[in-house]
Image (cartoon, rainbow, N blue to C red):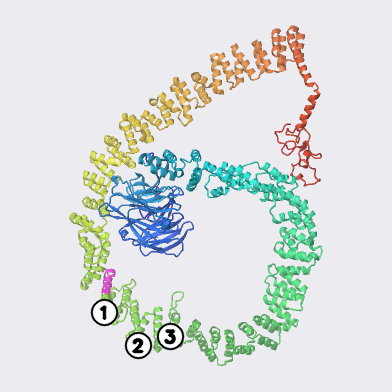
Amino acid sequence: MAAGVPIAFQEVLNLQQLQVPETSIKHGLTTMESDKWIVSVEPNQVSLIDLQNQAQVTRRPIKAEAALMNPSINILALRSGKMIQMFNLDTKSKLKSHDVDSPIVFWKWTSSSNLALITATSVYHWSIEGADAAPTKIFERHATIGSNTQIINYTVSPDTKWCLLGGISAGSTPGVVNGNMQLYSVEKKVSQPLSGHGGSFCSIKLAGREDMAQCLVFHEKKPEDPSHRLFVMEVGRDPSKGAPHRLPPTQIPVPPEAASDFPVSLVIDAKNDVAFLLTKAGFVYMFDIHSGKTMFRTRITQETMFVTCAQASTGAVFGITVRTGRVYRVGLNGANLIPYIVNTLRDNDLAIKVAGRLGLPGAEHLYTQQFEALMGAGQVKEAAQLVASSGTALRTPQTIARFQQIPAEPGAPQPVFQYFSTLLEHGKLNEQESIELAKPVLQQGRPQLMEKWLKDDKLHCSEALGDLIMPHDTAMALSVYLRSETHAKAIQCFVQRGEYDKIVPYSTSVGYSMDYSSMLSQLLFNNPQGALDLAKGLVSAEGGPLIDIQATAEAFLSSNRVQETTAFLLEALKDNKEEHAYLQTKLLEINLIGGAPQVADAIMQNGILTHYDRAHIGKLCERAGMWQRAAEHYSDINDIKRVFKNSHQMNPEFVVTYFGKLNREQSIALLKDMMSRGPSNMQVCVEVAKKYNDELGSEELVKVFENAKATEGLYYYLGAVVNFSEDPVVHFKYIQSACMLGQFKEAERVCRDSNIYKPEQVKEYLKNAKLPDPRPLIHVCDRYDFVDELTEYLYLNSLLQYVEVYVTKVSPAKTPQVVGKLFDLGANEDFTKRILMAVGTACPVEEMVEIAETRNRLRMLQPWLEARVATGSTEPGTHNSLGKIYIQMNKDPKAFLTNNMFYEPKVLGPFCESLDPSLAFVAYKKGAGECDDELIKISFTHGLFRDLARYLVERQDLELWAKVLTKEEGEEGDIDAEKEAQRRQLIDQVVEWALPESESADEVSCTVKAFMAADLPGELIVLLERIILQGSDFSDNKNLQNLLILTAIRADHTKVASYIDQLDNFDAKDIALICVSESHMLYEEAFTIYVKFARPEHTTDKDEQIEMQVLAMGVLVDFMKDLDRAKTFANQVDEKPVWSKLGNAQLEEKMAADAILSFISAEDASEYVRVCAEANEAEIYAEVIPFLKMARKNLQENLLDTELIYAYAKTNNLTDLEKFVNGPNVANIQSIGDRCFSEGLYNASKLLFKSINNNSKLALCHIHLEEYREAVAAASLANNVSTWKQVCFACLKASEFRLAATCGLEVIKYPDHVDDVVTTYSDLGHFDHLVSLFEQGLGLEDAHIGIFTELGILYTKHVPEKVMEHCKVFFSKLNVSKVVRACERARLFKPAVYLYMQDKQADSAVKTMSEHSSAFDNDLFLDAIVKVRNAEIMYKAVSFYLSMHPMLFTRLMEVLEDLVDHSRVVNQLRRTGDWALQLGQAYMKTIQKENLSAVNEALNELYIEDEDYESLRKSIDKFQNFNMIALASKLATHELLEFRRISAYVYRCNKKWSQSIELSKNDRMWKDCIDTANESADEETIEELLRFFCATSEKECFCAALYTCFAHVRPDVAVELGWLNGYHHFVMPFLVQNMRQTYERLQVLEKRTQPPKEEDAQDQIAQTYGQLGGFGNGMLMLENGGGMGGMPGGMPGGMMPPGQGGIDMSGFGQSGVPNGMPPGGMMPNGMPGGMPPNMSM
């Protein structure tokens, strides 16, 4: 997009790159409801593209026709057929679903809560609210937008009272698309048709109106009118508020080349009140909604953007192009809009309005001109309105001054107030305007106006505005300071208002830091509560405390503010951190000692502090008499015992709870200690034992109570835990203690209910205790089955009444055991009978009878049993026992067995077998099936076959029949002969007697089934023939006839045919199916059945007759496989279904030609798929054509038409083929064309592809037919790159170079296919044509970088002389890396270097020039070397120049001077050789100013080698960064004197005085010796030199040394040496100078020590007092060791000594320092008296 245009346009995403298939990127499948999601429906999944998360793609395996994402929340709507559903993706749940009545043709989210559904006739709204709510019908579609209109848009107004439905339809003129819209009023329920393609609703703020205007913006294009117009009109306005806003329609400037273009969407930029109209051809129109004018038009794409949406945050429009999937973003470019309107559109009025409304730059000069004109005309109000609408262009201090200078007219407000009033109506004032308005308002005393404007956010808050308001209203000023972020003054307001608790939260929230310590110090004396509030805020600030907690607490305590200290520390220590352990201890201590133990108790009660010194606090609590708190803080058992001596003063609940904190050993020891102090602690100890029974263990607790002989306590303790304990000892001890205390009821309860105690132990204890009440023992023995022992105990102890009580009241069920034991003990029978009669029916019969039988006392039970029967007892045991007695007594047993209903046959049956088998049979038969096995056994054993036969027939039980009829085989497979004989006798009895006697059909049927199940076909046939063929009541029974035939099928095939002929009432179909089954294969019999029952006398229904004939045909073709006989049968019956059956069979047998004839006879085309497949396989295309024509009469199937075309093609019947293709058909011409093409039927495929305009394949057909010109023409129509490429290559192979070039130009437009063209041309050797092709490609309108690049590569291979020129001319359009590689392969290094340099690849350019001399150019090399990124290349360049271009080395280093490490370069020169150092001498001199050791040393070596001592001396003086000692050592032995002097000089510079002097002595350089000694200032060195001069008689040197070294020579040494050596004249000047110096020093000393005059002394004293602290403003002078002046004595620094009032602060001092103060009155900060470090000392 060109610069300066008023829209910003860019491609932000490509759906194809996100793997969205091209086929899914179209209308209906890809949707975009907002700038959050793009949803695309793919064949087997739905892709969700999250635009807010870097276009992350989520694919879900959902099959749907369409999907739509909610514009604001993650709710996905899915549509499949008539089913629509909504899913919440966040909760992964289905919200609702609905089946619509009519298919949905379009749908859209009109809001985040409503989904619009458009069908062919109506519009519905479906809300996401309500799980069961169905879509609500809104309106019917208008006739002008009927079913022939494709719906492309639907929108709803912001107030949801207006709806706009839009669609397109084909016009009457070919190529013209009409637009139809329907505007519907929800309130009035009326519609208005509109002619246009797009529209949308918006809300705009109109000048001069308070309410928003709801406008409809739409495009109008009437079919008969070629012009396009834009309408903007207000809808839904209340008439009482005025006329609705409406603009006259404006013409839309459609370009001539887009005459047939039409809009596809109209999107509103609600942020800027701009409308974007997008068309099918890719044009974008931008309109100003307020004026309706067109502001810009351009074409942004050649493709259609089929879906669009607006981005609410920026106002931009997103659109997706069809198939290619490019996502474009189009938005307003505000910086260019106004200049474009002014300069291009030349519409100043529009520019002013738009700039003012949107606040855009570019119209300042227009505003200025109009403002001056209005002011000149005196139109103050209009000028104010202009300023208000100008944005920021005119709202300057100069404008305010202009209004202030205008004099007010009489009776009218001042112009400046009119100005401000107008600005307030339009919006918010800026900073200067707010200040200028506030000044007069506050002067007039009307702060309420300011408050209202601030509340309405009409003023710009600033520090200056706050300063104006501050004297009038602190609260309002605070609000201004807060809004303007003037933090310091906001905090001042908080202080003035006393809102100290708000200071810290505010400072923390805004990140403002200040000196809180000084503020806190000031408040501490003036407002302690305020100081406390501030300190709390400071210590609770986010990010950690802003003050030192310990120092702050010390400050509070120093003022004796215990309460405030406590409150502060509670706030500071609320986080309960371990590092605050000391402060926690001190907090509790100051309250415990300071007289407020209740405060400390409350703190400890809350448990907010846990890290304090618990032992110390425990002692303090103990001293304060807080026994419970002391106990809580002790951990040593001895301390705890000591405290618990006062347990009587403790709360019992606390004592009980406290034991939970102790370990097991401590708890037991404490309990023992408490129990040892007497019974006063008994109750609380019992409670402790109850609560901590599990933790302490019942065994130990029992021992504690037993050792204290506290049986009662033990009883109460165990009584509380026995119901929950599972310890046997607890239960036993509880029973024992209860018995000892006489609590027999409780002992009885536990014995009765407990399952824990050891019954043997308890039983022995109770027996030995011989309690007066044996009920505990009774319960134990009863529960644990000690009945015999209990009975014996009671009987022997004469407690017979308890025996009767036990069996009647406790456990009647154990009466048999008691009676049995009494029998064994020889008790009286009367007593026993009395017990039995007393127990009555509660005594179990079976067990009692068993015991009586084993002891031979059964008859004794007869009265008791008869008494039970008399009471109506139905217990089987009672009747069994009584039956046994009657059978033994032979008291009419058969009547009893027959009539009694309650005995058990399985019990009395075996009992009777040994006495009378017939009685046993009667008993078993009474069992009604339960005793069948026993009944069969006794019948077989005693020969009761007839009775058994009758029983079997009557029972009708197949399982019972199977037991007697089934043959049993022995272990070796032999049949038992005896059992077989018995079975045969039974069968005879059944056939001869039992079945003939029966008149029940069910009995007969069951018997027949039994014979069948027993596999007795022979016997069954005989039986059935007797019943059916010999005449009986069951002769015509269908089931029996079926059974007879089936039995014959299984047993005797020879009889089946005769039975079929004789019988007529059987199931023919079922029997026939059985006959043809694999197990029988009686095909003739089955065929006979079908033929017989196909006759009219057996089947009257015609359809059933045909069905039988078809089944008969099925037997012939499916089973007998006799197709000839089947064909004969088909001719006989001549029925179409029969022919169809035959045709299918013939297809199965691959008889395709016969099958086709059969299907034609049947007029059946149902198997056309198989017929076509078989015909193709057999290649009988001529034969299949009649069948296909017949099939097409009834079927319209794609396959039929396709195969017919193929048959025509295969038979080369091109005339019929062309006629058929051009006529109506449903053939898949594309696929059949591809098929013919693949088989070489190019003439046929040419006709097919031509009919469907598949020019791509048509071109290929022309190629195979060698019709190259026609192929090129078809390719141009196809305009497909793959087609162009194939045609190009074919023409190339046919040497049609001109045609190949025409196609090749179309191919190389696509970068991806350039390589294929090059490869093909190269393989065929047509290099010149290839170069020519790409040279022509340079002139293409859309020539891309690949063409230029590939041509450059071709030049390197075939025309190297053109490479450099090509690179220079088209560098910006080359792929540099590819061309460079080609140049290097062709060894064209100069072009390569040029490309590297142009591409800013200096590293590669340098490398190439270094490696290839032919490419080297010194200027180019120097230009490149300074641009390299890899510094190592520079050092390689140094080596390169040294070896290849040494004469240019200095120039190279001049360029690299600021870029290289010179030390490394010098080392590189050294490694190269001495000649390299000589070569680099000029370079090193240039860079010696850097004072690098390597450079200095190299140059010094060169100077020494050249014997240039002057340069060496200068170098040493200026640059001393080198190893000077090494140089001095090297020069010390030099043959030249000057170099040895330099050595001495170097030693002197390094303070090696002795070595320097020694060298100078050796060379007799006396002056150097003297200067060195004087510079050393060492008395010994100088004295040694003086003595040397004396020893060598160098008098003049001695004198010179004294003069030079005067300040360092001791006078005594000089006099001594002069006297000893006779140098009086040489030493005298030294002595004279020394005396003069001594005199002057004495004079100065006398003046200093002279006493002051009296007046001066008084002035000095006054000055001293004036500087004392507290006496003026002078600086406080501190003594070296004293305390702070002015403080009371007794403590350093004037602090109050401990014990003299106040709180002991010793704990807050530093460790190891008495009283918390450092020695000498030093405060903790290290300064005397705690003063700051900058005080004078």
Determine the residue located farthest toward the left in the rendered image: 1215
The span picked out in magenta is 1106-1122
Q: Position of residue 1407 (x, y in %)?
A: 43, 29
User: Who comes first in sequence, dot 3 or dot 1?
Assistant: 3
Can see residue 1627? yes
Residue placed under numbered mark 3 in the picture: 953
Residue placed under numbered mark 2 in the picture: 1033
Q: Nearer the viewer, mark 2 or mark 1?
A: 1
Dot 3 alpha-carbon crowd within 10 angstroms: few under 14, some 14 to 19, many 20 or more: many
Q: Is residue 1489 magenta?
A: no
In space, the residues marked 3 and 1 are separated at their CA atoms by: 41 Å
Q: Amino acid at mark 2?
A: Asp
Residue 1204: name its quadrant: bottom left
Residue 334: name its quadrant: top left
Q: Position of residue 917 (x, y in %)?
A: 52, 88
Answer with left or right where residue 1467 lies relative to residue 1692: left
Q: Amino acid at mark 1?
A: Thr
Which type of secondary structure does the marked residue at label 1 adopt? loop
Quadrant housing the C terminus: top right
Q: Amino acid at mark 3?
A: Val
Residue placed under numbered mark 1 in the picture: 1100
Dot 2 alpha-carbon crowd within 10 angstroms: few under 14, some 14 to 19, many 20 or more: few
Q: Position of residue 488 (x, y in %)?
A: 61, 42
Q: Nearer the viewer, mark 3 or mark 1?
A: 1
Which type of secondary structure does the marked residue at label 3 adopt? helix
Determine the residue located farthest toward the bottom in the rendered image: 892
- In the image, 804 versus 650, the foreground residue is 650
Label ID, residue 706: none
- In the image, 748 versus 973, the foreground residue is 748
